[in-house]
Amino acid sequence: MVGAHGAVIGRYERDEVKPSIEMATQLAEALEVSLDYLVGATDTLLESSIVNRILDIQKLKDTDKQHVFALLDALLKQTKMQAIL
């Protein structure tokens, strides 16, 4: 999927060599994980569909962003309250 030979991927997996930033980026995209997750900088696995939605939200007008976040905040608050009960 990233155009690298299996032997090279094996060397990455065995930590014998480090991939270039370009290759690491391609690997993260192929695996549908963030680059931070791939390199171990975070243990939070962000789904690509969620990341894409966040990127779409960033493109909205400020007023539209406020509406999206108000709805999201209300839903999250409700969900947290239900978990407590």
Image (tube, rainbow, N blue to C red):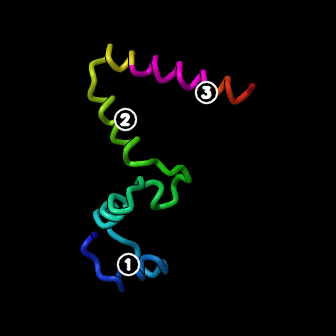
Q: Tell me which secondary structure the magenta stretch mostly adopts.
A: helix
> Label 3, on which residue?
79
The N terminus sits in image quarter = bottom left
Q: Are there few (<14), some (14-19), or many (20+) residues within 10 Å of tag 1?
A: some
Res. 29 mark? none
Q: State which region is magenta.
A: 68-79
Q: How many marks?
A: 3
Judge by depth and name the residue closer to the eye, 21 or 83. Answer: 83
* Residue pictured at 38% horizontal, 56% vertical: 32
Q: Judge depth for marks 3 and 2 and give the one in front.
A: 3
Residue at the left extreme of this rendering: 3
Q: How far across and down, in percent of the image, does residue 10 sit?
A: 42, 82
Q: Regarding mark 3 in the picture, which secondary structure is present there?
A: helix
Q: Regarding mark 1 in the picture, which secondary structure is present there?
A: helix
Residue 72 inside the magenta-drawn segment: yes
Q: Give, as a three-letter code, the residue at label 1.
A: Ile
> Label 2, on which residue?
54
Q: Give, as a three-letter code, the residue at label 2.
A: Ile
Give the mark nearer the N terminus: 3 vs 1: 1
Q: How far across and down, in percent of the image, does residue 54 sit?
A: 37, 35
Give the mark nearer the N terminus: 3 vs 2: 2
How far apart are the two marked residues, 3 and 1, measured between alpha carbons?
Answer: 42 Å
Q: In this image, 14 relative to 23: left or right?
A: right
Q: How far across and down, in percent of the image, does residue 84 sit?
A: 73, 27
> Label 1, on which residue?
9
Q: How far across and down, in percent of the image, does residue 79 sit?
A: 61, 27
Residue 81 inside the magenta-drawn segment: no
